[in-house]
Amino acid sequence: MDWGTDLWDQYDHIDKHTQSGIDLVDRYIKFVKERTEIEQSYAKQLRSLSKKYAKRGSKEEQDCRFSNHASLQEILNELNDYAGQRELIAENMMTGICVELTKYLQDIKLERKTHLSDAKKAQQFLEGSFKNLESTKKRYAKEWAEAEKAIQQSEKTESDLNATRLDVEKAKQHAHARTHTAEECRNDYAAQLQKYNKEQNFYYYSEIPQIFNKMQDMDERRIRRLAEGYCQFSDFEKKVLPIITKCLEGIYAAGGKINEKQDSMLFIEQHKSGFERPADLEFEDYTQGIKPATSDSSLNPPKVRAKLWPFSKKHKPPAAEDFSHLPPEQRKKRLQAKIDDITKDLQKTQDQSEALEKMKGVYEHNPQMGDPTSLEPQISETAQNIGRLRGELAKYETWLAEAVGGEESSNAINNNTQHGVLAADQSQSFYSEFDDEFEEVESPVGHCTALYTFEGNSEGTISITEGELLSIMEDDKGDGWMRVLRAGGDEGYIPSSYVKLGP
């Protein structure tokens, strides 16, 4: 069964059916375009969300050392990759479905238009042939009527006794001429009828069936191409499913990496001060007489040190290069920061040295571009800088190893001296190292009140008494210590958790 055989007389329905199929293709293209817009918008929102909650800045990067913080960053990175796959789906659908189907739609519209035009031309040709047949038939009928009339007139003239011989001959000749003309029209009509029947047979049994069968083939190809487009709608997403699955598995794995015990230990290592808890307060016996009030607790013998007056011109020794005047944890952090800075400078200098060597090689192969010997001073200088930086790096790494390895012994010494056995000597020692920081006037950055009594027995620290008002000279840098100034002029580091910030 085919359109040419069974639908030979259904031109209008074939016209509407094929147009409906083309409209369906156009409708599907619009549907896929809107789907791609949704995917692109979804991917954009996912990327914005990932960027919004991503850690930025040194403080947040430090937090990422904890497994629960780092896992969230991994989840955000996986989500960003997931958004990329959604964008890939949108891109593949746009190029593989929308663009290709749009191009195919233009071709099939042109093909359909050609088939319909051929059918119209065939129909118009048959209608023109039928009009010629009708015209020939009418002429034959007219001429035959005239011939019969002429024959009757000839017979009447011949039977008339009053008619002359000449009148009878004229009547016969006229009747003969009309009869001859009618015969010619009859032959023309018969020939035109035979031609029309042949053309009509060709139209209904050959030409129109071929055109309709071509349109049937065109419509079936359209349906098959549209079916492929339907399948592609699923295939493009199925192709990226393995990667999407990996993203989701990565998110799940990030959650499984979290180690709460490890995070707790890391937090302890970052912020432990290394000092023992405050000792019990001694009983003060006021029956033996009230002691003069001082800014220090009775547990803390007064420091033997003159006040630090602004604009003093004393020349104090500089602070230790190995930061040995600082508390253990802060010393380690300062040394690590110094090592990081030297490492960055060393890498930058090495890159500069490699660039100079490459430039020298270019000059040697292409003398017209420059003189290789002109780069020798710079190469020599960078080599010296590399050697100097490597020496400094080794020096600070050694100090850091000593600080890490000697932390336990340092804490033991601090515990033994907590009751003030060596307080006076230590006080003089760390004050002499801190004097260089007070040669210029330094304004406080805030004020605070001591919540607890703190025995500052290690280098760089000072003792404070509960309820004492202090001036903050340096905020907590994230290591749990701050530098403060007492009313009596003493200055040093104390734990940040031992004070309450004031206005």
Image (cartoon, rainbow, N blue to C red):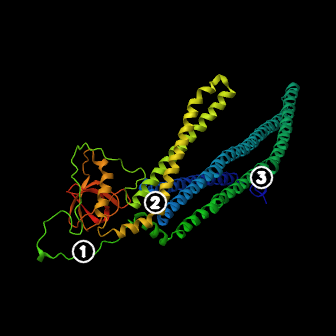
Residue 31 seen from this side? no
Name which of mark 2 and mark 3 comes first in the sequence: 3
Residue type of the residue flagged with mark 1: Leu
Secondary element at image label 1: loop
Question: What's the residue at 59%, 26% (across, down)?
Answer: 374
- Kindly indicate the quadrant of the structure image that contains residue 359: top right
Q: Residues within 10 Å of mark 1 (few under 14, many from 20)?
A: few
Residue 263 seen from this side? yes
Q: Residues within 10 Å of mark 2 (few under 14, many from 20)?
A: many
For the C terminus, which image quadrant? bottom left
Tell which tag, 3 or 1, sits nearer the viewer. Answer: 1
Single out the residue that lies furthest toward the top: 368
Q: Is residue 433 above or below residue 242?
A: above
Residue ID for mark 3 = 213
Name which of mark 2 and mark 1 comes first in the sequence: 1
Give the percent coordinates (x, y) of residue 292: 13, 66
Secondary element at image label 2: helix
